[in-house]
Image (cartoon, rainbow, N blue to C red):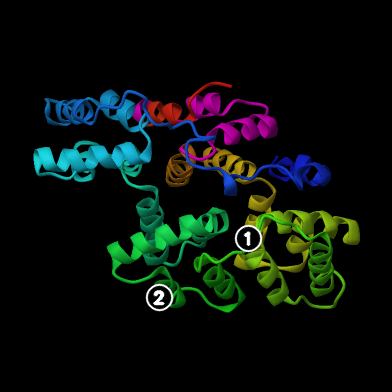
Amino acid sequence: IFRRVFLVLQDDLENFARAPSSFTAAPGERGTIKAKADFNVSEDVAALRKAIEGIGTTEKTLIDILTHRSSSQKQAISKAYEETTKRILVNDLKGDTKGSLEDLLVALARPPAVNDAKWLNKAIKGAGTDTNILIEILASRTNKQIKEMSAAFAEVIKKTPMQELKTEVSGDFGKAILLLAEGARDESTNVNADKAKEDAKALYQAGEKRLGTDESKFIEILCKRSIPHLRQTILEYKNISGKTLQKSIEKEISGDLEELLVAIVKCVMSTPAYFAEKIYKSMKGAGTDENTLTRVMVSRGEIDMLDIRAEFKKLYQRSLYKEISSDVSGSYGDCLKMICGGED
């Protein structure tokens, strides 16, 4: 079933070249977590205090507030909560909830850049580098998101992500990761078809056309060029090679670098489809990968969850809401369903 995931996109490249991208979506536009219209910070602080300080935590209140306020509103709540109680909201959430629900609520309460910084640090600092998290974050985030994450990382860890990553990643994979971590991808929206054709030809000659692969050419083009340019390049590549760029990468490159470059191609083609696949895989097989599920649902809730829901249904013929309902239960499942935002 995983092989089916991008067939629609791969077989209909002409239609996707000019399609809108999540890389250009502003928070709130295609998300399910939106700003509350009649937002009252004092009421929310009082409700959170009652839920946390009462006998037994009222999880429903915590879930309702944290899934129905924008990130900026939640930061206003956190500030007012600390001024009122002299305590930090995130710490109180940690003390009053446990396990997956705790991780989910804490992530919902934090600014997105702080979440990315903490997830990246965890990926670097765990027993062995978790390349899956590095790939997911750095392949899918905009320059602005990467720069905000880097600033949050430096504030919390007292080092930049670049300083930490240099000691953790190496080889061609390391070069690509460090390029992405700069947050310096070209952001031009103009597409020069001739230059896209040149890049497509360069990729073909660096891989399919020669004995051995010139990985540096793939890294340079896929990690530096703008998203609209890469969309056109993918289209031109299919015309030159007769294969999709993704299939060529899978044939010519291996290991972590292959995973990273494929993730970039998938995000260029459709970030929502990339995350729909991540969510599907996190819930399939023996047990649920709750860390991935939490990370994706929280990081995309305010950005493109509506599009992820649509892609999930298109790819798996089932609503994301129903998939969550059948796979996870309790307050953790209830909170995920709130982020999902509906059954369609």
Q: CA distance from mark 1 to mark 2?
A: 23 Å
Magenta residue check for 147 = no
| Disc number placed over residue 163 in the picture, else none | 2
Q: Which residues are magenta?
A: 302-331
Magenta: main secondary structure equals helix
Up the image or down, 219 lies above or below 25; here it is below
On the picture, is 109 further left or further right than 266? left
On the picture, is 97 further left or further right than 323? left
Q: Mark 1 or mark 2: which is in front?
A: 2
> Label 2: few (<14), some or many (≥20) within 10 Å?
few
| Figure quadrant of residue 105 | top left
| Residue ID for mark 1 | 259
Counting every numbered tag in the picture gives: 2
Residue at point 84% right, 68% down?
Answer: 201
Residue 278 in the image, given as x and y percentages of width and height: 57, 44
- Cβ–Cβ under 8 Å for marks 1 and 2: no
Circle nearer the N terminus (1, 2):
2
